[in-house]
């Protein structure tokens, strides 16, 4: 390794990492890093505790001390630079042809001798003398050094923003933790276990987001380190010999062109992931927030079903209706589907079911096949069926049907939480929970209504009517 290269590295170590110039009246932080006196105190401004620009260690302003010995070393290095004659050490011999290296190929960025140029190599390439090439690339590298300075400052600013976002993430997590606590204070003692689970999910998500943010900051630090290295190499080229300069310039350009600034990661906690299941929340508040307008889809109705003009009521008729043919129509089961279709979110609607049996309400896949619509019990449904004195529950992850003994309801409230994979049923206006069917929804679903032969009409009603 040449004296010129070693001196260039030494010069790089005596630079201030804030102004990127030679250290002036150097001072040392408690973490051991050195800066110009003016740069350090301008960086601190009115703050008493600041993160070190290099390692981000939180340093006390009062613990920044002068380093006179380092100042003398900086002066000695500058004197060595002034006396050095870096042009003595040059690469002069071609290892292949044993001739002097007097040329430089601009296409391949490679030192050449006069015999390196031939039909099979460097032919028709731009080849110039090493003196001309060194002068040209010194100017280019010097121009790039200014650009690298700007890029490094911009990257440091982005890294500083991400540091601030770490604190914002902590505050956001604390705010959500407070909201969760307020919710749990209104619940009964048996919800203590649910509270701990929710806190655990929040903690894990906060940990995951914090790790991603930490990785993003680390990527910026690596980028700053790379930019600093390239900057030092570019600055060192100003005083390096032609041979040293041109022998490394190809790698320099390759490293510079491969630079890619890390993307900004915006930390955000998924607040909806911590919304409580419907049966654990204030029912009235949830009804007001998630009630939607549901209508019936006549094109899906069995021919024995009459759908009202306002599409809010469906009635069984012994006489088949004269209706247009439709591939969406149910042909075996007295079923009609509703609008809208759901592929996300939380939704509540209510159905007045009357006092007779039999009927069923729930949800089903919106894109049922023709074969499914021709089935007596269509697959892909999550529903409760009233059997006179009990409910039959079908659908969900457990294919087995279950029975729930119950008194006759008048109005059924239905709540769908698509992301949570739950459809819950409530007796209205008592607001008592009947059951919840759990599954994983992977495609759009829609409201489902079944009307038995002896059923009263099923009528969609508003949240006010349900009360």
Image (cartoon, grey):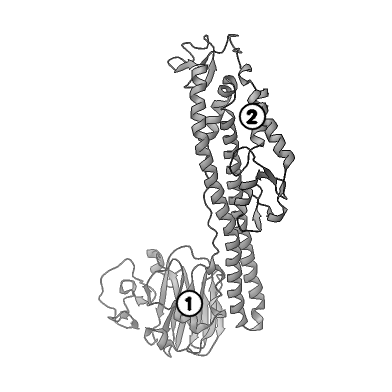
Regarding residue 60, the answer to whether it shows in the image is: no
Q: Which one is in front in this view, the residue at disc 1 or the one at disc 2?
A: 2
Q: Position of residue 58 (x, y in %)?
A: 68, 55
Q: Residue furthest right?
A: 69
One can see residue 137 in this view: yes
Q: CA distance from mark 1 to mark 2?
A: 71 Å
Which of these two is toward me, 374 or 70?
A: 70
- Picture residue at 51% right of the left edge, 42% below the top: 150
Q: Which mark is residue 318?
A: none
Element under disc 1: strand
Residue in view at x 54 percent, y 13 percent: 102
Residue 205, position in %: x, y?
60, 62
Number of callouts? 2
Q: Can you identify the residue that label 2 sits on?
A: 8
For mark 2, give the secondary structure. Answer: helix
Question: The C terminus is located in which quarter?
Answer: bottom left
Which residue occupies 68% across, 43% down? 26
Residue 3 to residue 378: above or below: above
Is 65 situated left or right of 205 in this image? right
- Residue placed most toward the observer, 425 or 354: 425
- Badge 1 density bin: few <14, some 14–19, many ≥20, Cα 10 Å: many
The residue tagged 1 is 415
Mark closest to the chain's N terminus, 1 or 2: 2
Mark 2 is surrounded, within 10 Å at the Cα level, by few (under 14), some (14 to 19) or many (20 or more) other residues, namely: many
Residue 261 located left or right of residue 198: left
| Percent x, y of residue 272 | 52, 69
């Amino acid at each position: 390794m040449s004296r010129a290269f070693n001196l260039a590295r030494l010069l790089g170590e005596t630079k201030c990492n804030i102004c990127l110039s030679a250290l002036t009246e150097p001072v040392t932080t408690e973490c051991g890093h050195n800066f110009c006196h003016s740069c350090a105190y301008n960086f601190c401004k009115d703050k008493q505790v600041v993160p070190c620009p290099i390692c981000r260690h939180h340093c006390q302003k009062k613990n920044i001390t002068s380093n006179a010995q380092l100042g003398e070393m900086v002066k000695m290095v500058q004197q060595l630079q002034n006396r050095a004659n870096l042009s003595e050490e040059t690469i002069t011999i071609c290892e292949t042809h044993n001739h002097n290296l007097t040329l430089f190929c601009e296409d391949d960025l490679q030192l050449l001798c006069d015999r390196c140029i031939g039909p099979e190599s460097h032919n028709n390439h731009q080849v110039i003398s090493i003196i001309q090439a060194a002068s040209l690339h010194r100017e280019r590298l010097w121009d790039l050094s200014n650009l690298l300075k700007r890029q490094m400052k911009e990257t440091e600013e982005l890294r500083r923003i991400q540091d601030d976002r770490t604190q914002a993430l902590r505050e956001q997590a604390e705010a959500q933790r407070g909201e969760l606590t307020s919710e749990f204070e209104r619940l009964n003692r048996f919800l203590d276990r649910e509270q701990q689970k929710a806190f655990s999910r929040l903690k894990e998500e906060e940990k995951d987001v914090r790790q991603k943010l930490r990785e993003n900051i680390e990527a910026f630090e690596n980028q700053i380190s790379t930019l600093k290295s390239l900057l030092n190499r570019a600055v060192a080229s100003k005083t390096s010999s032609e041979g040293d300069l041109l022998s490394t310039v190809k790698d320099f350009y390759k490293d510079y062109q491969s630079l890619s600034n890390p993307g900004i990661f915006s930390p955000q906690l998924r607040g909806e992931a911590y919304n409580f299941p419907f049966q654990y929340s204030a029912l009235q508040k949830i009804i007001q927030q998630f009630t939607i307008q549901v209508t019936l889809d006549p094109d899906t109705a069995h021919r024995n079903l009459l759908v009202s003009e306002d599409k809010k009521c469906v009635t069984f008729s012994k006489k088949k209706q004269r209706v247009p043919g439709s591939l969406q129509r149910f042909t075996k089961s007295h079923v009609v589907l509703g609008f809208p279709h759901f592929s996300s979110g939380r939704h509540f609607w209510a159905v007045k079911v009357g006092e007779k049996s039999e009927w069923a309400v729930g949800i089903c896949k919106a894109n049922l096949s023709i074969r499914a619509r021709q089935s007596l019990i269509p697959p892909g449904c999550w529903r409760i069926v009233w059997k006179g004195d009990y409910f039959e529950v079908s659908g969900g992850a457990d294919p087995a049907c279950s029975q729930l003994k119950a008194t006759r309801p008048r109005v059924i409230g239905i709540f769908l939480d698509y992301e949570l994979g739950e459809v819950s049923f409530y007796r209205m206006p008592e607001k008592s929970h009947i059951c919840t069917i759990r599954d994983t929804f992977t495609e759009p679903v829609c409201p489902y209504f079944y009307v038995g032969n002896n059923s009263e009409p099923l009528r969609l009603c508003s949240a006010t009517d349900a009360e």
